[in-house]
Amino acid sequence: MKKLTAIIAFLLMLTACGNKQQNSTMSTITPNPQNALRAQQFLKDAQTYFLATVDGDQPHVRPFGTAEIFEGRLYIQTGKSKNVYKQLKANPKAEICAYKDGKWIRIECELIPDDRVSAKKDMLDKNESLRSMYNENDDNTESKHVLC
C-alpha cells in the first residue's frame, strides 16, 4: 500500500494528494486535484472520522466531525487548549480514518498550522455548532492543512 503524506492545520487542509479507500478489494485513488473534494465528501458522509496522533511513544485516537474545503484544500478544526493540539505541535504526523457502508478511507498525513483568520472563519461559518466554543479572532482556534 502506498504511504500518503500530507500537511494538516488544526483546520485540516487536504491538498491534491492521494488517499486510499477500501472495501473487500483495495482501490487506490491516484493523486489529482479532485482528491481533496472526494476525501471531504467521504468524511462528511461518514459523519465521524478518527484522527490518530502520538504523544511520545503513545498513540491517541479520537473522533472528529469537521471536514471542509477551503481554497481547494481539506481542513479540520480544533482548539489550542486540547491535547490533540499539543500532540500535533510536537509531532505533526497523523492519520485520519473513516468507515461507511462497507468502505473506508485512511489518510496518512502531516498537519501544518494555518493561522489565517480567513481559514478559521471559513471553518466556523460552515460549522455553526463550533461558534459556542470558538471564534476566528480568539487565540484558541487553530487551523491546519494537509500536504501530500
Image (cartoon, rainbow, N blue to C red):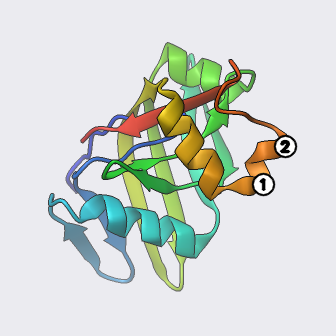
Quadrant hosting residue 92:
top left
User: Is the residue 134 above or below the residue 38 in the image?
Assistant: above
Q: Secondary structure at mark 2?
A: helix
- Cα distance in 3D space between marks 1 and 2: 6 Å
Q: Is residue 79 left or right of residue 58?
A: right
Q: Which residue is mark 2?
A: 132
Whether pointer 1 and pointer 2 mark residues with C-beta atoms closer than 8 Å, the reply is yes
The C terminus - image quarter: top left
User: Is the residue 76 above or below the residue 1 in the image?
Assistant: above
Residue type (three-letter) at the residue carrying disc 1: Ser
Question: Which residue is depicted at the point 66% across and 25% down?
Answer: 137
- Which numbered circle lies on residue 129? 1
The N terminus - image quarter: bottom left
- Which numbered circle lies on residue 148? none
User: Is the residue 131 above or below the residue 103 in the image?
Assistant: above
Q: How many other residues sit within 10 Å of disc 1, few (<14), some (14-19) or many (≥20)?
A: few
Question: Which residue is depicted at the point 64% across and 47% down?
Answer: 124
Residue type (three-letter) at the residue carrying disc 2: Ser
Point out residue 53 in the picture as x, y percentages from the top left corner: 55, 33
In-front residue for pair 60/49:
49
Question: Which residue is depicted at the point 56% across and 16% down?
Answer: 56
Quadrant hosting residue 142:
top right
Point out residue 116 in the picture as x, y percentages from the top left corner: 47, 27
Q: Is residue 8 visible?
A: no
